[in-house]
């Protein structure tokens, strides 16, 4: 529906968004690795969260891995590794644009270390909700969307009235409030989980990330950082 381009929201406590930039760089490097192996889906699935395999191996067993994986990644470890793989270039670009525009101010509100923990927890929560809703699924879950959804929820709770530039309908540049831009995006996720689950998008993972981000920002933000500023 829209692509975020930038916001009118300067940093207040940190000098630079080092963690956000590092996360973007890691995602790009992993995608380049994917491209170098020709997008080998069987290999990529070793790093993906596959609900059926997660529960089969035992997600609380750090040494458990499904023997069919080309690379025996412990199933619990895939709750982290899946966030850094993407289905295609547009999947990567979309997630990284949202992370670039909104991640810096969430990092500013949390501080570098807590922001990294926040991001990873949101990604794990996203995968767990997706797996819990679809425990028999053998489809591989990859992508940063769940973690980025947590960033979106946090940004909306921190800065709903900030102006955000978006590209609407792929060609129309508009400046609207974060509440409108992100509120529409969140509403779309809620609508989509109510419809029959078709296509490659893991809508429940987005919901899991949103819930985690909204809860975590309440307790993890730096002292004195207001909500809904």
Image (spheres, rainbow, N blue to C red):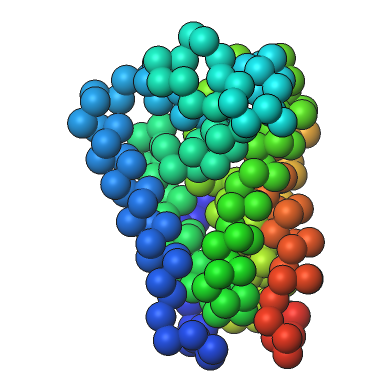
Name the spot of residue 132 as percent of width and height, x first: 77, 29
Farthest-out residue, top: 68
Q: Indicate left or right for 140 with 34 as reference.
A: right
Q: Residue at x 30, y 32 (%)?
A: 34
Q: Which of the 4 image quarters holds residue 114? A: bottom right
Instruction: Say if 66 sits above or below 9 in the image.
Output: above
In the image, 37 versus 179, the foreground residue is 37
Q: Residue at x 54, y 46 (%)?
A: 145
Total numbered badges shown on the rendered structure: 0
Name the spot of residue 218 as percent of width and height, x first: 78, 71
Q: Which of the 4 image quarters holds residue 173? A: bottom left
Name the spot of residue 111 as percent of width and height, x first: 57, 77
Q: Residue at x 45, y 67 (%)?
A: 19
Quarter of the image that includes the C terminus: bottom right
Q: Indicate left or right for 108 with 189 as reference.
A: left
Q: Which of the 4 image quarters holds residue 35? A: top left
Q: Is residue 3 visible?
A: yes
Instruction: Say if 45 sits above or below 221 in the image.
Output: above
Farthest-out residue, left: 36
In the image, 106 versus 174, the foreground residue is 106
Name the spot of residue 189 as percent of width and height, x first: 68, 45
Q: Is residue 102 visible?
A: no
Q: Residue at x 49, y 38 (%)?
A: 81
């Amino acid at each position: 529906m829209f692509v975020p381009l930038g916001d009118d929201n300067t940093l207040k406590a940190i000098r630079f968004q080092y963690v956000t930039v590092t996360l973007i760089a890691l995602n790009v490097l992993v995608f380049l690795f994917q491209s170098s192996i020709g997008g080998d889906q069987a290999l990529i699935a070793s790093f993906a969260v596959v609900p059926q395999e997660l529960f089969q191996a035992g997600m609380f067993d750090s040494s458990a891995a499904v023997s069919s994986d080309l690379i025996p990644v412990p199933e619990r470890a895939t709750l982290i590794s899946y966030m850094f793989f993407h289905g295609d270039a547009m999947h990567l670009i979309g997630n990284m644009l949202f992370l670039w525009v909104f991640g810096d101010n969430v990092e500013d509100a949390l501080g570098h270390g807590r922001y990294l923990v926040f991001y990873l927890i949101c990604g794990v929560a996203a995968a767990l909700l997706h797996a819990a809703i679809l425990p028999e699924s053998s489809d591989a879950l990859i992508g940063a969307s769940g973690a980025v959804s947590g960033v979106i929820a946090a940004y909306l709770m921190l800065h709903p009235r900030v102006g955000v530039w978006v590209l609407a309908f792929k060609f129309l540049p508009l400046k609207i409030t974060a509440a409108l831009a992100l509120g529409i995006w969140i509403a779309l996720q809620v609508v989509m989980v109510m419809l029959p689950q078709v296509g490659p998008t893991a809508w429940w993972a987005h919901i899991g990330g949103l819930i985690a981000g909204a809860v975590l920002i309440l307790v993890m933000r730096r002292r004195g950082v207001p909500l809904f500023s």
